[in-house]
Image (cartoon, rainbow, N blue to C red):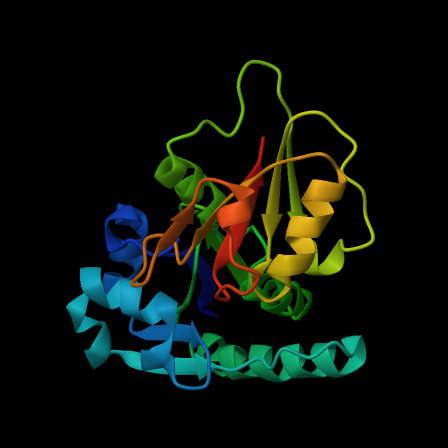
């Protein structure tokens, strides 16, 4: 029988926000796939290692995906990475691919999941705490109340879009474009708060849009109510 590929969310950064199910699956399986060239340096690995120290004794499979914009080259890269996992699945071994936050929200595992399923392999997603939920908790604010909608935008792909709906906006992937994101919100007549490295070392919290620096780290997001 072929193995199963699990996409397992380890939460946003705080090891205490990692689920019991994620911990169990890492403990029960011997092949752990980690996004990045050097697995031990990845944020997902460090979070998992806090709860499962024995992860270092397991077979660690680094899955490196370059951040490139060419969709055709990107797809070829995803196929190459999926084939690495398929070798283990063909041998009847499960593969637990750990990812930050939740694997259903802008996760690198999604690309591999499509390929694996098309190739006839079984995949399963294991939910984790999302970065925007953790950030809202850190800011001590509700994301939505009563009938308010929530709009989640990957800002790097939405720079030409508009904010013209009621409710809460979450701008993800703002780290390298924070100055543009701030202008984007101000031009829409909105204020915002932000969290950088939520739950991680170097966490920074900004309660006013004017306090947010124009340059922030990769793990940054904004919430505008």
Q: Where's residue 124, x and y in %? A: 49, 54
Residue 32, percent from left and from top: 36, 73
User: Quadrant of the rendered structure where residue 58 is?
Assistant: bottom left
Relative to residue 43, is residue 165 depicted above or below?
A: above
Whether residue 154 appears in this view of the structure is no
| Number of disc labels | 0
Q: Residue at x 71, y 83 (%)?
A: 76
Residue sitting nearer the eye, 102 or 217: 217
Q: Is residue 200 left or right of residue 70?
A: left
User: Hey, which residue is sitting farthest front in the picture?
Assistant: 210
Q: Who is closer to the viewer here, 103 or 220?
A: 220
The answer to which of 121 and 80 lies nearer the viewer is: 80
- Image height check: is 151 above or below 149? below
The x, y position of residue 43, in whole percent, is 37, 68
Quarter placement of the C terminus: top right
Q: Residue 149 at x, y = what percent?
A: 64, 26
Res. 49 visible in picture: yes
Q: Give the residue drawn at x 34%, y 75%.
A: 31
Q: Quadrant of residue 37?
A: bottom left
* Left or right, 86 with reference to 167: left
- The residue most toward the top is 146
Q: Residue at x 56, y 13 (%)?
A: 146
User: For the point 37% across and 54% down, which residue is it?
Assistant: 204
**In this rendering, is residue 132 above or below 75?**
above
């Amino acid at each position: 029988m072929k193995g199963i590929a699990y996409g397992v969310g380890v939460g946003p950064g705080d090891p205490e926000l990692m689920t019991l199910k994620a911990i169990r699956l890492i403990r029960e399986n011997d092949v752990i796939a980690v996004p990045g060239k050097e697995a031990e340096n990845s944020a997902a690995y460090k979070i998992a290692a806090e709860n499962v120290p024995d992860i270092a004794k397991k077979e660690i499979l680094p899955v490196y995906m370059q951040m490139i914009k060419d969709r055709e080259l990107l797809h070829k890269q995803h196929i190459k990475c999926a084939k690495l996992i398929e070798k283990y699945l063909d041998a009847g071994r499960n593969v637990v691919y750990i990812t930050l936050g939740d694997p259903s929200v802008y996760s690198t595992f999604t690309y591999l999941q499509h390929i694996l399923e098309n190739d006839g392999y079984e995949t399963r997603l294991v939910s984790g705490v999302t970065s925007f939920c953790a950030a809202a908790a850190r800011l001590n604010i509700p994301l939505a109340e009563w009938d308010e909608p929530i709009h989640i935008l990957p800002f790097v792909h939405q720079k030409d879009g508009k904010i013209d709906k009621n409710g809460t906006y979450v701008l993800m992937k703002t780290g390298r474009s924070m100055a543009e994101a701030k202008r984007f919100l101000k031009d829409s007549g909105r204020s915002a708060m932000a969290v950088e490295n939520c739950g991680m070392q170097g966490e920074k919290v900004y309660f006013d849009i004017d306090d947010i620096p124009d340059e922030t780290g990769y793990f940054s997001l904004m919430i505008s109510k």
